Image: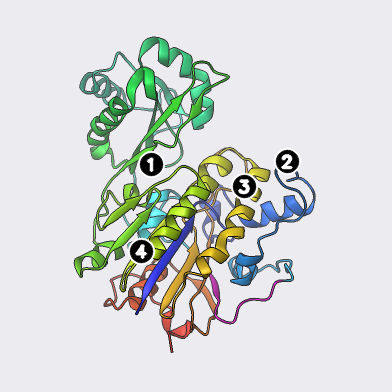
Amino acid sequence: MARAFLFVLDSFGIGGAADADRYGDAGANTFAHIAEACAEGRADREGLRSGPLFVPHMASLGLGKAAETATGLGFASSGTDVLPTAFHGAAQEVSSGKDTPSGHWEIAGLPVRLDWGYFSDTVPAFPAELTEAMIREGKVPGILGNCHAPGTEIIERFGEEHIRTGKPICYTSVDSVLQIAAHEVHFGLDRLYEFCQVVRRLVDPLRIGRVIARPFVGETTATFERTYNRHDYAVPPPEPTLLDRLTARGSRVIAVGKIGDIFAHRGISQVRKAAGNMAMFDEALGAMDDAGDGDLVFANFVDFDTEFGHRRDVAGYAAALEAFDLRLPEAFARLRQGDLLILTADHGNDPTWAGTDHTRERVPVIGTGPGLKGGDIGLRTTFADIGETVAEHLGLAPGRYGSSFYAAIGGHA
């Protein structure tokens, strides 16, 4: 019987987006630029990694061929043969923006047609009436930041003042987001979550996609460190997604990582979280063990994005890819006849690119399953094709958006 496993390598784009110039990202390519840096020795770091990027298991699923599909350019062979049951291709996003909810909702069969709201790249970034309401209804003495900024940098700038004054640090980016950093002890984790819920309600009329709680610890600029108690407060999807369709018919959707938050916990049967990609991989493997017929395990591996993409850490990103790849055989070993495993991404975050924001890129669509004939699925015109393929595999009727490529990869004998 059919089960499906959908692993999202958060921000692992492969370039080539047809509309990248609209976002200032023409030429961005997370995978290619990391691989290039590794090949040239620019991603060597003592005690971490060295040499060419080594991801043989993703290569065996056709990652290199997917990259060629995305850009039309040749990609250096890793010397790894593609598995007979593997399929490979790339997908172009049709949703507006290059943020997490848009990418994940579209993967789950629902392209985002609405226009998100954004905050201007000015100081202050937030409208005065919003700031006043946050202070008044959130019962805080004021806010710090009120600008576009990288998360770690703004905590370094305002963390000590935050501890001294009790004012939360509020900031944004080019995404439709309002992020709130506060100290887990001095401000309080529960109080941070409560404040974020107030802000979530206040920004609803502005069509802001997410309010994100960003807790941190430490006592000085030199010791501040964000924790894994992040929580995203997202707008619920405006229409049913693949997740809703599955749970409505009685199947389970096991969400690993921040998937539950991204979908405002709609269509989610169970949430499993952990600190870091490797612990998250452990949770994903456990979910694979527990999944039954007709179930979906939907996992997000966020460290690629938050720890390395946004921080423009090429060596760290490369090492994280290699560590993830090293564990893929554990997932392969859990696949049974009738199972489907897909690896993809929600957007890019090229660590060699200017700035610290996401990059508009196509994403890989690679995977395998016992009994599949595999092959080239080409360039998919929407991420929704991924969700519709999972839907067909799990026996659901077609949705409103996207086209399944399940027939092309062979179904199951």
Q: Secondary structure at mark 4?
A: helix
Residue annotated with mark 1: 176
Q: Give the amino acid type for the residue marked by disc 4 in the picture.
A: Asp
Task: For marks 1 and 3, give the CA distance.
Answer: 24 Å
Position of 350 with respect to 155 (left or right) is right
What percent of the width, then of the height, locates residue 330?
53, 64
Q: Earlier in the sequence, mark 2 or mark 3?
A: 2
Residue annotated with mark 4: 290
Q: Mark 3 or mark 4, which is nearer to you?
A: 4
Q: Which residues are magenta?
A: 80-89
Mark 3 surroundings: few (<14), some (14-19) or many (≥20) residues within 10 A? many
Residue annotated with mark 3: 317
Measuring 41% from the left and 16% from the top, which residue is drawn there? 162
Q: Mark 1 or mark 3, which is nearer to you?
A: 3
Task: For marks 3 and 4, give the CA distance.
Answer: 30 Å
Q: Earlier in the sequence, mark 3 or mark 4?
A: 4
Task: For marks 2 and 4, give the CA distance.
Answer: 36 Å
Q: Secondary structure at mark 2?
A: loop
Task: For marks 1 and 4, give the CA distance.
Answer: 35 Å
The disc at residue 47 is 2
Q: Earlier in the sequence, mark 1 or mark 2?
A: 2
